[in-house]
Amino acid sequence: MGSTIRVLLCLIVIFLSSPLLALELLQDRELAEVTGQAFVSVDSSSYSEGGETWDFRRINLGLDIQTLLTADELVVGEFERSFRDGDGTAPMVVEGSDGSTRTVDYIYDENGDVAVPSADLILENFALGAVKDPYSANPEVDPFRIRAPYIELAYQDNDQGIRQVVGFRMGFGRAQGYLSADLLSVTGNFEAHVVGNGTDAYRSACVDGNSGSWDQCLLLAAVQGSVIYSPIELLDGYTGNALPEGTNEDAGYIKRATWAGVPTGGNFSTSSWLSGILPLLTAKNCEISGVKSCLKTGIYQSIYLGLPEDQRPEGATFEETSARGMFVSLQSQDVPWEDLSGLSNAGRVYTERGAFFNSAAYADAAGNRRYPLTLDLYGGLAGKPRVATCVGRVKGC
Amino acid sequence: MGRFILVLFVSLIFHSHTFAELRSLSEVEMSEATGEGLGFAFEDFAFSTDGAVATVTGFENSNNEEITAEWRQFYIYGEGSQYGTKPVTTDIGSYLHPWVFRTVRGGSSPEYAAFEADTALLELKADSYENPLQDSASFILHNRYQGCIWGHNGCGEGASPFDAVTAVDNQIGEYNAEYSNLLNTYSAVYGSQASSSLINETEAVQTPGGVVYEQQLVIESRRAELESAIRSYENDNPGVYAAAQQTAGAEYQEAIDLYEQTDQSVSLGDKYSCGLFGTSCTQEERAYNNQIDDWADAQDAVGDIESNWKDETLALSAANGELGDILIGEDSIDETGKTLAQRIADADRFQVLCGDSATSDDCENGLISRRGEERGTINDIAIAIDGGQIRRQGMDIGSRFKFELVNENKNTGEITRVDDFLSFELRGVYLDGAYMRLWSRPDESGLSELQGELSLRFFAKEYAISSCGVECEILPDDSPETIQDKVLLRDSTALKLNNYLYDLNLGYGDIQPMTFQVTSDGNFLFEMDMPDFDRTGLPRTVENVRAFFNDYYDNAPKSNLIIGQVQIGSVPESGPNYGDLGGVRAVGLRAQYLRIESFDLN
């Protein structure tokens, strides 16, 4: 009807004119200073190693994003892999105890094969950001901040010399805030720092338990009050090894891990004069001096990337307190992505066919190595509780 | 701009009502108008730039060196155009399912319930379908459970469309079993109030006064003390700690490099045994052994510095340990036999499975309920397919670009200029159900502000991204055989995203509108604030705030990005398909808060 057109035209005029009310005139001088704002730039590079060459095209976005974002599930790289197929696919295992020591068994699928997760990355109840005071009448957003996100394509020539896309990654130039998820399957770098003290090690190995021999206990008694620390990484929950049984030599890392910890052979560092006790604190069969050193990834519910607000020096800028180097990638073959963590020895992040999540150590503004997640050796068994990402409940909204 | 050939067969169909008769309306009639709007459709539509080239300048790399882009091809054809080489026509909307441009009053139907009655909306909406088989968002849901990767064809010979129903039934069965297990565990202690009691208990320990909350405050305080001690050292000794770490990192890298030159018969970090006089080692092994000493010295230097904040580290460790005791210590186990950490996880799971209804011991609006609703849609589609119904054809949309870039060789540092080609081609595209709504509201300063809501539903059977260069460039005088060869070459080297659904929903009526501003320095600001409870006019109590957010969580649309299969190159005729990278899903995305501001990279 005619009324429709009239109402429509009126509304168009109203809507178009409304935003004009807030516009301010610019002086000629101000106007002269306004140039095209380059919020997109494109970097091109090539890299050769082992007789192969890759080309990279990175699209940098000049965007400053603050968000509280939730998702029911994120799944990347949902394709066929199987345990002992050589690429390092981790088995799914069930943990138990015979009363004194850890027992572990494979989980089998309906075909009688050892079960593995269905995808390289499975993150349920994913969230960026958090809600402060979620149960109060005044909940507030604690946003996740991303600056300068980028997307990057990797190319390589195929056998006929035709250029082909072989990988894609999406990353954050800088990021700060809570990242939460139920980590049901993880492939990539999941680096954390575990810190403990000699007192707890002594108590666990020599008082509450008896895993330490008399000479080891003598040494541990002498180092009570000392700080011990180690990086932790993804591992095979069945053996406690960094790579599962049947992994080929050319496979560089574990796929579809559901466990993390100090892998077999890994040990703790401490200050120099205590180095004699380190062999006692070496992980073996998922234990370090009587303490479990293999933990389900699912218990790490929230990670804070960057420096939390209460730890930042007064006046510190986002550039000084944010984390670098985080990305998610998907590639059809080996791709050496440039390491953007800022660490002095940063070179390439070597990825293989499938998905890859890089949450690794990075350099802070002073050049210090920082980890996205710091755990206590003994308290760390409880994992990292999730921060609330909804109002009135922790997750599931 | 070069020659621009527009092949356009348009039949513009306006709703018959709209043109019926134009006459003046009285004020009373005007106030009753809800706005039926304009309906339009483009039937037998085809569009191609056909050789025209647009050059885009102004792009730069990170070193402020200019790069150029040429937009060399753009086409919109019907499905089956074979990378735009065959001018197949398509329909954008139809007489029965037109695109609509109209005004709507807030609250006039359930679809506009998130708008207040005094809101007048301007809406542009793509074609929409009641039949779930024709509704792309519903159709891809069936595809996902069916395991399809290319419309119906990917579902496999002899597969039943009801396989998807079985799959979703199995998933609902698993969720229900999980819910029953939780209920059995906790009803033994809490009786009929199992989920509500558990949620109340775990909420109490995580709120002010609760043991977990208070211990987390202690940890935060200890962590701040540790950071302060480190900063204090760094202020007194600028750069010393970082330099020691960098030295340790460099020594470690050197150790790795030397280790790779040995036979690697010892673990990295262990030394080779060189005998009493050091003669039973190779020169490389001795060099590696020496480097291990240097690395250890460098680590010791870092350790010595870190001993300056040993007390603070130990205090933090002790506080973490106490939280561990609270969460998983022996004392944390209650009558259910579960630790507090397990009970918190179970309370969270109750709410994931049952939504906020778990707080009243029901299971009505969580994952179980959502999957149940999806099951109905999936079943309807299975019945339709089983009855012989087919989906309408989509569009083919493609663009091809040529870039001249500044390339850095990361091995040698050499800088060269290189040409790049990139094609984006979508086959079988559907936009049905997409809409944009605009309206006006006063902002904080009382000035009118343009607000909006966007639902972009974009489904493509295949999204092909190709970087094939001049070999794939189709030239005007190419023969049909040459064109066919180039099409096949492009296809065999492309990155393909099969069954690609991009279902983006931004904004939720007056409750969470999106706003867009351009600042005086030429940057833009896009914002979607946290839903504003105060708009309800109700007293700000815990109960009212929760009810408001529960309503938002239950009704505000979520976004989805679903790729049925990522395939690089063509599928080999025999042997393993290493180009298959499987599915990618980001399901149920929601921005409760979003603020995007652009800045100048250079």
Image: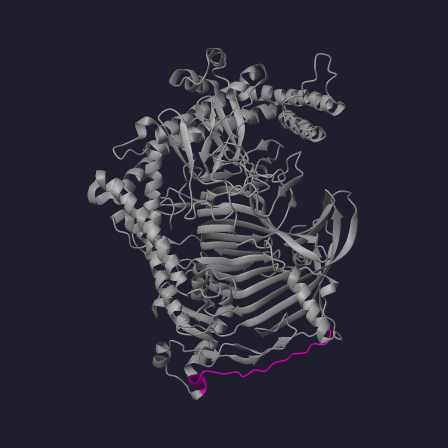
Does the stretch in magenta take in B590? no
State whether residue B396 appears in this view: yes
Is residue B448 or residue B41 the one in the foreground?
B41
| Quarter where residue B247 is shown | top right
Is residue B417 or residue B575 the one in the foreground?
B575
Is residue A111 or residue B464 the one in the foreground?
A111
Is residue B347 or residue A217 the one in the foreground?
A217
Residue range corresponding to the magenta coloring: B1-19
Residue occupying the far bottom of the picture: B21
Q: How many marks?
A: 0
Where is residue B152 drawn, in percent x and y? 48, 67
**Residue at x 34% of width, y 80% of height:** B28
Q: Main secondary structure of the magenta part?
A: loop
Where is residue A18 drawn, in percent x and y? 49, 66
State whether residue B197 appears in this view: no
Where is residue B230 drawn, in percent x and y? 55, 26
